[in-house]
Amino acid sequence: MKTLRILSKEEFAELQQMFVKYVMGEDYNKTQYEEISDKYKANADSLTVEELKKMIYPIIFGLFEVKTDYDKAEKIVRPIFESVKNAEPEDIDSDEYIDWMGDFGQVSLLLGTIYVYKDEFVKAAYHLISALKTDCLTLNLPYCDFIKTALDQLGSIQIEEARYTGVGFDVDHPMGSDGGSYLNAMVAPEVISCMEGVNGEVIIAKRGRSGMFGYLERRGSTMSENVANILDIYETYVVDKEYNIKKMHLYFNGYFNRDNRIKVRLANGFRFKKKNLVSDIFEEIK
């Protein structure tokens, strides 16, 4: 889990302090920060997500000579995160749902960033990846480098193997294709990073414009008596809602038919995210 650009949390905080107007907007200043803080104290529910961001950034990064206080920042953001999460609209094809994903992504990003500075990297990974998987964030490259560096910290943690069974976890019942002769090596990373657990588990892997976020590696290949093709073995991490992290190995059949819409079988206990960028490309085999 190595990145080309290692950007420590200390370096990232210095960048935020140096480029306040670039990050927060040309007209943002200490007076506006204090006005938003007063608004929060008067009525915490009245803050927009953008105002929340403008209030929390100074507390995380020490902007405007504000004292950094990660516990305070978490105490403010945590209930707002829960409120936003519980307000998920039912219609995933509505404009309301797109707006909700934007808010959920921003609040998740804030919470994940706070956990990085608290050195709670499993919690950070859960929320940072959840934020990225909304596909509704526009991040500058330093923030991308910061996130990648933070996620790399999982490599230094002793992580147990997940005890999943069934399709995807059994060499004789792989996920992926159920037949075909055309090898498409790009399918596995796309499919695996777009899956989520039916009980809220988050796979710590996300394909992005600046490369892979998190951890997903092909660990080798193997044969099965039930499948004619060679199977690939992928390794990644999965974190549940209680922030328990496990290492997960998946058997993937990457040989497909040349169809416009690729049919794939997902791992047992997982599904495609409700709203994703690959729904026009992949069709889940039920």
Image (cartoon, rainbow, N blue to C red):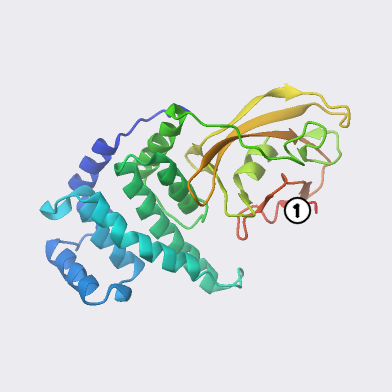
x, y (%) of residue 102? 45, 63
Q: Quadrant of residue 227?
A: top right
Residue at the image point whose x is 29% and y is 38% from the top: 9
- Look at the picture and state if 47 lies above or below 229: below
Assign the C terminus to one quadrant of the image. bottom right
Amino acid type for the residue under numbered disc 1? Glu
x, y (%) of residue 259? 81, 47
- Look at the picture and state if 209 lies above or below 216: below
User: Which one is in front, 148 or 211?
Assistant: 148
Q: Is residue 244 left or right of residue 193?
A: left
The answer to whether residue 225 is visible is yes
Residue at the image point whose x is 26% and y is 58% from the top: 56
Q: Which residue is mark 1?
A: 283
x, y (%) of residue 271? 68, 52
Residue at the image point whose x is 47% and y is 39% from the top: 210
The answer to whether residue 22 is visible is no
- Look at the picture and state if 109 lies above or below 187: below
The local crowd at label 1, few if under 14, some if 14 to 19, many if 20 or more residues have their Cα within 10 Å, is some
User: Label 1's element?
Assistant: strand
Q: Is residue 93 left or right of residue 39?
A: right
Q: Is residue 121 left or right of residue 224?
A: left
Q: Quadrant of residue 124?
A: top left
x, y (%) of residue 138? 42, 53
User: Which one is in front, 185 or 173?
Assistant: 173
Q: Quadrant of residue 94?
A: bottom right
Q: Is residue 84 left or right of residue 56?
A: right
Instruction: Count numbered badges in the picture.
Output: 1
